[in-house]
Image (cartoon, grey):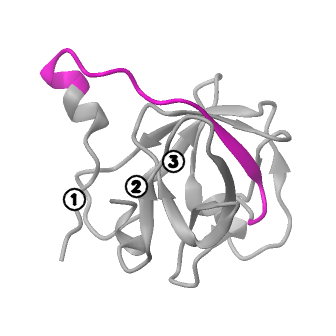
């Protein structure tokens, strides 16, 4: 399942090598779509490594509706989920190598990325919990 706000969109799980693009799904959120089928949201597990075609761009939260974005120093990130204990909020995020976390909804549309690596199979309960997707809250 993708972030709660994409639960009404056709979706599929990410696979290594997938070509993705950031897209506004018209539901108050953005996410990753399949470059070959823009109507399909691609759901990424926490811990998945992603490489952007160019350095990642992000809007600052206080300028959410601004067309302007700042450029990250990095073109790679690890998919995370944040604030899992808070229902009805955006959880999907990307963490860059310097530890900066950016909500996926703050990425401008049209950024191309590739799934480099899926997360390893968890060996402990803590690892399993880190990889658990937020359940849709209804």
**Is 64 placed above or below 27 here?**
above
Q: Determine the CA span between mark 1 and mark 2.
A: 11 Å
Q: Which residues are magenta?
A: 109-127
**Is 38 placed above or below 79 here?**
below
| The C terminus, quarter of image | bottom left
Q: Is residue 36 left or right of residue 53?
A: left
Q: Determine the CA span between mark 2 and mark 3.
A: 6 Å
Residue lying at the far left of the rendered structure: 125
Label 3 element class: strand
Is the Cβ of the residue at disc 2 closer than 8 Å to that at disc 3? yes
Q: Hey, which quadrant is residue 50 in on the image?
A: top right
For label 2, the residue is: 91
- Residue 103 coordinates in the image, percent (x, y): 55, 53
For label 1, the residue is: 135
Is residue 108 found inside the magenta-colored segment of the image? no
Q: Determine the CA span between mark 3 and mark 1.
A: 16 Å
Q: Earlier in the sequence, mark 1 or mark 2?
A: 2
Residue shown at 58% from the left, 78% from the top: 25
Q: Nearer the viewer, residue 17 or 33?
A: 17
Nearer mark to the viewer, of 1 and 2:
1
Residue lying at the far bottom of the rendered structure: 26
Label 2 crowd (10 A; few <14 / some 14-19 / many >=20):
many
Residue 93, numbered label = 3
Residue shown at 50% from the left, 39% from the top: 79
- Residue 26 coordinates in the image, percent (x, y): 58, 84
């Amino acid at each position: 399942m993708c972030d709660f706000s994409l639960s009404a969109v056709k979706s599929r799980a990410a696979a290594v090598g997938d070509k993705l693009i950031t897209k506004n799904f018209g539901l108050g959120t953005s996410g990753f779509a399949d470059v070959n089928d823009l109507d399909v949201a691609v759901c990424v597990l926490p811990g998945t490594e992603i490489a952007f075609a160019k350095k990642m761009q992000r809007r600052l939260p206080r300028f959410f509706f601004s067309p302007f974005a700042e450029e990250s120093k990095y073109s790679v990130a690890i998919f995370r989920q944040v604030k899992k204990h808070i229902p009805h909020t955006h959880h999907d995020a990307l963490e860059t190598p310097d530890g900066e976390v950016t909500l996926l909804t703050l990425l401008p549309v049209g950024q191309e990325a590739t799934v480099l690596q899926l997360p390893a199979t968890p060996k402990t309960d803590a690892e399993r919990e880190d990889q658990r997707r937020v359940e849709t809250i209804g």
